[in-house]
Amino acid sequence: MSNDAIGRRELLRVAGLMGLGAFSLALTPEALAQAQARVTRSPAQRRTVVIDAGHGGIDPGCIGYSGTYEKFVAFDAAQEIARLLEATGRFHPVLTRTRDEFIPLQERVVRARAVNGDLFLSIHADSIPDHSLRGASVFTLSEKASDASAAALAAKENHSDVVGGVNMAGQTPEVSNILMDLARRQTNNLSIGLARELVTKLGTEVRMLEHSHRSAGFAVLKAPDIPSALVELGCLSNRDEDKLLRNAAYRRKLADGIVGSVDAYFAHVVRV
């Protein structure tokens, strides 16, 4: 991981621990060096990849063509991704939920940051009005949505005033903007690199939607210090893809593509 990435993460963590008002005065070079030493990874150390199975509990997510609940498809796929990541010996996968339970969006981000995640992948399955459309897609964070459908998908998540586990309520806009700019600039760049790898690797395994990388203001992607992406495994609204997503062998193909993208991300996007 680059020094810039480490510095970005530690700037945010020190600010959160010390209070934003003290942020600009108390972060000495010595303190930053100590913070960097705590999070530096050697190539031999396993990277922590947080796998977030969307929805759960009282929230079923979308309901597919056959009555399939998104929450079950996402959970089964997340477990398979975690299993394959663990099998590589290079990654430490952490599931945000290990059973059928409801977890608020911000709590998912908090859990990812609590385990010092190096990467965050939120796993979902889509439902769209045109039932003839099918294919996987990838989303990254953007306050300005890339298109109307991306905006609609993220609209329900745009009301929160808690960004990535750091409560911005009560802070001046100037302080909040400076902090978030420092924390998110490189994180967003890394997230875009991750999305490109996801689109490439998934595209070798399964069918992708046209314009398969899009962006919108998803609350679950707002951890400012963890590169993040949301993966729509396919369209449950399409009869054929609904059937595929209920098939364990097809979910294995999706998991293979995602694990390959994680490998490629750390090999090509992140500079250790």
Image (cartoon, rainbow, N blue to C red):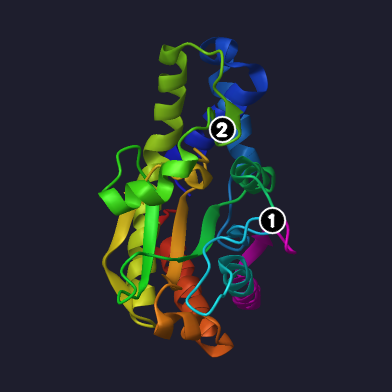
Name the residue type under label 2: Glu
Query: In this view of the protein, can residue 3 be seen by the observer?
Result: no
Tag 2, which secondary structure? Answer: helix
Q: Which residues are magenta?
A: 79-101
Residue under the point 35% across and 74% down: 135
Query: In this view of the protein, can residue 172 be seen by the observer?
Result: yes
Does residue 1 lie above or below 260 as drawn? above
Does residue 156 lie above or below 51 as drawn? above
Which residue is denoted by mark 1 in the rendering? Answer: 58
Q: From the viewer's perspective, is 5 left or right of 162?
A: left
Residue 149 included in the magenta stretch of the image: no
Q: Position of residue 11 (x, y in %)?
A: 53, 28
Which residue is denoted by mark 2 in the rendering? Answer: 10
Q: Which mark is residue 20?
A: none
Please name whichever residue, 12 or 203, is drawn nearer the observer in this view of the structure.
203
Q: Position of residue 260 (x, y in %)?
A: 46, 74
Q: Position of residue 225 (x, y in %)?
A: 51, 40
Residue 95 included in the magenta stretch of the image: yes
Residue under the point 65% across and 72% down: 79
**Which quadrant of the figure has residue 155?**
top left
Name the residue type under label 1: Ile
C-alpha distance separating marks 1 and 2 = 36 Å
Q: From the viewer's perspective, is 174 left or right of 83?
A: left
Q: From the viewer's perspective, is 13 left or right of 245?
A: right
